[in-house]
Image: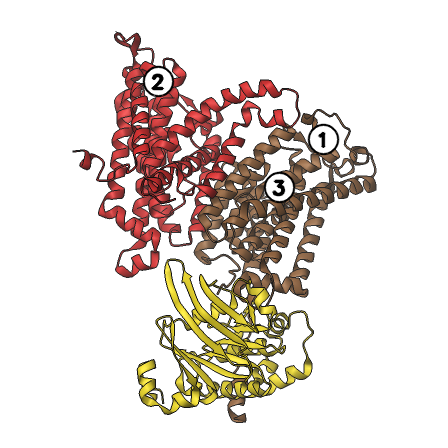
Chain colours: A brown, B red, C yellow
Amino acid sequence: MSNQQTIAASEALPKKKLDLMPLLLVPIMALLAYPVVHDLPTWATLTVAGIGMGLILFLVASGFTLVFGLMDVLNFGHGIFVTLGAYFGASLLGNSLLMNMGGSLTAPLAAWYTADDLFLNMLALFCAAGFGMLVTAIIGFIFERLIIRPVYGSHLTQILVTSGGMIVAEQLILALWGAEAQPLMKPASLNGAILFGEMAIEKYRLMTMTVGLIVFAVMMLLLNRTKLGLLIRAGVQDREMVEALGYKVKFLFVSVFAAGAALAALGGLFWGMYMDATTSSLGGSMMVMIFIITIIGGMGSIGGAFIGAILLGLLTNYTGFAYPIMAAFSSIILMCLVILWRPNGLYPVSKR
Amino acid sequence: MLNSLFSGDFPRSRVLTAMLIITFVGLLLTPFIFPGARAMNVGAKICIFIVLVAAFDLMLGYTGILSFAHTMFFGIGAYGVAIACDKLGPDWSSVLIGMGAGMVISAVIALVISLFSLRVRTLYFAMITLAVASAFHILCSQLGEVTGGEDGINFMVPDLIHPSTQLAEPFFGVEITGQIVAYYGLFVFALVVFLFILRVVNSPFGRVLQAIRDNEFRAAAIGYRVVVFRSISTVLGSVIAALAGSLLALWLRYNGPGSTLGFDIMMDILLIVVIGGMATMYGSVIGAAIYLIAQNYLQDLLKLVQADVEGIPVISGMLHPDRWLLWMGLAFIICVYYFPWGIVGKLRMRALGIK
Amino acid sequence: MKPPILKLENVNTHIGPYHILHGVNFEVPEGGLTMLLGRNGAGKTTSLRTIMGLWTASQGKVIFEGHDITELSTPEIARLGIAYVPENMGVFTELTVRENMVLAARDAKIDSSRLDWIFTYMPALKKFWEQQAGLLSGGQKQMLSIARAMIEPRKLLLVDEPSKGLAPAIIQNLVEAFKALKQTGTTVLLVEQNFNFAKNVGDTVAVMDNGKVVHRGTMAGLAEDEALQTKLLGLSLDSHQ
């Protein structure tokens, strides 16, 4: 008996290989781009801009990929949370709060936001982002109940219904805010760039990068160091078993869905600010990039979404500079190459 | 005779038969009973969308493939004719060259996409096709020299189908112009292509597609090469979409990114196929007719209603004529939930006594 | 005699268009180990999944400790004290052995004396405590899956074919583990194909065929009656030795 136990115990356990290859893709892409751009300051500026854009994309993609991983739900309407985040920001920080509703209210935070004071600017931004994220999370909660809850299990119906939900939500935004684009200014004290030699880095980029990195770090900690994170990771892999252990996955899922919506709203706010304005199609136009990131990263993988988002951000900036016409197709080519290398994405999530 | 015309796949519901006859007669007589350019335009668009949606239903309803690149092929066909007529002159040979080129290019691209991604899950296919289609859209908006960029291409068509051509004496008070010829050409074309697709889905090939849709593993186990069948279905659907695009370009004498490639057109197709009824073919006819008439006249209706609620915030915003899509979208969601088989499916079930 | 801890009354289950269980009736007496035997496709796994609420019975009742649990959700059923070890083991391969156990302990902290007791039967788990569960061998994963069900005292364990695909030496380990578990008074409902295994640990037995229970009795009784075995299971004991 004890003899047999030792057999079972002494079997050598294969070492877990830390899979760093996908991580290397980021510096590889940056290095490959250098001969094309051929100018160090420009290259550095593009690289920083690409990483900044990637981090914003990550904010949006993270919720999408987790929702898919956890409940096998493909939310084609995820972009609406992006749009909402930008609109809430525009309403709170600018002067256009629901003008269509007959009011000409002055946005409460506008004065702080336009003051020449970094602290006040940031405070206003923080309040606007927080409020927007909260409200979007609630809307996400309702969206899940109304639109997604009835169609668990059927991908086709999910795609149809969430696309429909997106149309309706976009139209409601237009009905509430009007058809005009909503101006969305960057914080007054973050206009302009910091110069490192000849290399210019926009201050605004630095801010969004910092926030993006903090969110990523918090998310990684949450997923790897807390019981909630354990449950999410376990649920992505085998939802049924998590339920059989006595946890309500549906509740877990709704929470993740709402949190994903909130992060998308933050991404939308940053993205809209970067464009200086937002329209009702802001989120819809971002969905394609989110799909590409999710496919590149592996559906359900946060780490994969992070690398995928940064790769896409870099690529878009490099090609946008060197071959603008190819900008749209270059991301498709990147996606195809990744699929050829790893058909289930950079970090495939093993399912039952 | 009828049996072979409809490939043995009859409407199987009296109400549906009546609706189809009304649609058929309505489209047939549009130039005479609804005078004016607008009605004829709606009629022509219905004919084109019947073909476009029937091809989409071949893929979605009968094969279980959700391709978001359908509009891309629609656009390729339209650009084919537009570019050919623009560069080679407005004669029939350039129309044929444009159509042919559009269809061949579509076939090749569809084949590449299918072979590349039909092995992966349905979801991947949907997302990949959406990404490719949107990249194509952007590319067409940027390649100004070839595609006319955002402005698109206005081009001349052969005299026979040009609206300013006067062909015969007025008939029942309607001038017989090139536009009338174009309309009936379109009508016949759409009818023939529709009956062809109907035949395809009711052929042994179509049965295999449905077997694959219902149970991929079983179909593969029986010995059908799933990827081959799916690819053929995708290529066929895409080529027909290109054909529909060519027809649209000829009718409008124009093509641009907005008229064939927009994501809103993809949503139109989805709405029509769901409202009409997936995997029914006749659904594309009923769906296209109802949807396009609603699209064109719902705005008029909203204009009337909005006048009454003028000044009430939110409500008047929601009833603004430009917000017609809001109501279509709501109808769509309700449709997916409560009538997942669409109008045609519902009518057939009622005819069979199934609630 | 104590009332049975679990009772299935005329349970019918449909999976999609397929009717799998056609009126299953059996009882699991409290304490001891009940075997659920039968050929492939007889409906054993479906029965366990129906008890666990992973499929819902279309007709009939599942009664646990006198309460009707047919309509409860899976997490609710689990929290009544039923643990489930599925056929595929349901190990979270991306998580470590420890993390798997933490989730299984639910709201409680892992009880270290109970863990030590588990380790005596499953030393591999101790050795690879902080390793990723996906790296474990098949037998070790099975151990982990059963250990998860044992880490907190549960009233009833549902175990689906634990011996599947395991080497005989490891199966012997499993037998010992189940015997030890029986001594703690835990009730176990065990689905098995391996008759030898069943004979070694089972107290009572129910045999299924075509979605119904066709025989109920003691394990010892069935083990002695070779004719009955051949009739019910379609194979003689010899073929499994």
Q: Amino acid at mark 3?
A: Val
> Which mark is in front, 2 or 1?
1
Q: Amino acid at mark 1?
A: Leu
Tell me the chain of label 1.
Answer: A
Residue at 60% of width from left, 82% of height from top? C127
Q: Amino acid at mark 2?
A: Met
Q: Is residue C134 left or right of residue A119?
A: left
> Which mark is in front, 3 or 2?
3
N-terminal-most mark, 3 or 1: 3
**Residue to which mark 2 is pinned:** B156
Q: Is B28 drawn above or below residue B127 in the view shown?
A: above
Q: Is B44 drawn above or below residue A276 in the view shown?
A: above
Label 2 – label 1 distance at C-alpha: 48 Å
Near-viewer residue (A216 or C49): C49
**Residue to which mark 1 is pinned:** A97
Q: Is residue B354 left or right of residue B196?
A: right
Q: Is residue A281 visible?
A: no
Q: Is residue A38 visible?
A: yes
In the rendering, which numbered label is found on residue A187? none
In the rendering, which numbered label is found on residue A82? 3
Q: Is B279 drawn above or below residue C87 in the view shown?
A: above
Tell me the chain of label 2.
Answer: B
Residue at 69% of width from left, 45% of height from top? A133
